[in-house]
């Protein structure tokens, strides 16, 4: 559920090269011709940009001065040329680090979700979750509107025609019960007439 993006800022030549071979990557590539455009996206809380790895070809003081930008997420490629394999290795290593850090602590309501260890906790106690339960929580947390059973079926389960809708409802029911029993919280996942919502 953590979609990784690589934002290329003021580095048009690199973007053109990567866009030709983008089907080789598991991350999204976003191009920004000007650093101000990227900064405006960050300030507007664009999640793709906030969670992205940022690639530039020289140190850009504007980017390093923006509080919302994680300085560890900026890769500067100022020693060129570089072999494509070396470039991809550096990007992949940085993306792995970024994903691990993101997964180790995610705040959702009054809880911290660590999906490296698959534990949700508050200040008093913690609860072990299954991988599917983590996927449900992450999906619902990303959405601002209630999500229908059909939407959950498509996005979380990958939509299998032989999957019955009661399977989704059963998983949600069990997850809500686990959270209620452990944390005495009946409002973590809210049942709405249009679906479910965190």
Image: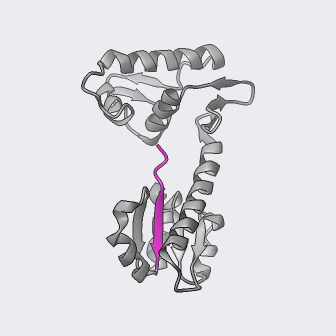
Q: Is residue 93 located in the magenta-colored stretch of the structure? A: no
Residue lying at 61% horizontally and 42% vertically, measured from the top left: 106
Q: How many labels does the image show?
A: 0
Q: Please determine whether, in this image, residue 31 is positioned above or below residue 156.
A: below
Q: Is residue 8 located in the magenta-colored stretch of the structure? A: yes
Left/right of residue 133 with respect to residue 69 in the rendered view: left
Where is residue 139 drawn, in percent x and y? 44, 37
**Residue 98 figure quarter:** bottom right
- Looking at the rendering, the stretch of residues picked out in magenta corresponds to 1-9
Near-viewer residue (187 or 171): 171
Where is residue 127 drawn, in percent x and y? 65, 23
Q: Can residue 198 be seen in this view?
A: no
Where is residue 107 drawn, in percent x and y? 61, 41
Residue lying at 53% horizontally and 14% vertically, measured from the top left: 177
Q: Please determine whether, in this image, residue 108 is positioned above or below residue 179.
A: below
Q: Residue furthest right?
A: 124
């Amino acid at each position: 559920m953590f979609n990784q993006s690589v934002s290329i800022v003021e580095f048009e030549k690199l973007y053109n090269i990567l866009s030709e071979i983008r089907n080789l990557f598991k991350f999204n590539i976003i191009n920004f011709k000007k650093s101000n455009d990227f900064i405006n996206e960050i300030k507007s809380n664009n999640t793709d940009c906030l969670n992205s790895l940022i690639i530039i070809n020289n140190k850009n003081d504007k980017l390093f001065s923006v509080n919302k930008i994680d300085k560890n997420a900026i890769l500067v490629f100022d020693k060129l040329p570089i072999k494509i394999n070396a470039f991809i290795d550096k990007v992949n290593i940085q993306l792995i680090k970024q994903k691990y850090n993101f997964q180790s602590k995610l705040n959702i309501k009054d809880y911290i979700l660590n999906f490296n260890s698959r534990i949700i906790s508050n200040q008093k106690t913690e609860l072990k979750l299954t991988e599917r339960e983590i996927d449900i929580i992450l999906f619902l947390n990303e959405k601002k509107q209630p999500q229908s059973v059909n939407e959950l079926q498509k996005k979380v389960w990958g939509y299998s025609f032989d999957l019955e809708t009661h399977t989704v409802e059963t998983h949600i029911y069990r997850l809500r019960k686990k959270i209620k029993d452990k944390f005495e919280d009946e409002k973590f996942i809210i049942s709405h007439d249009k679906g479910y919502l965190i």
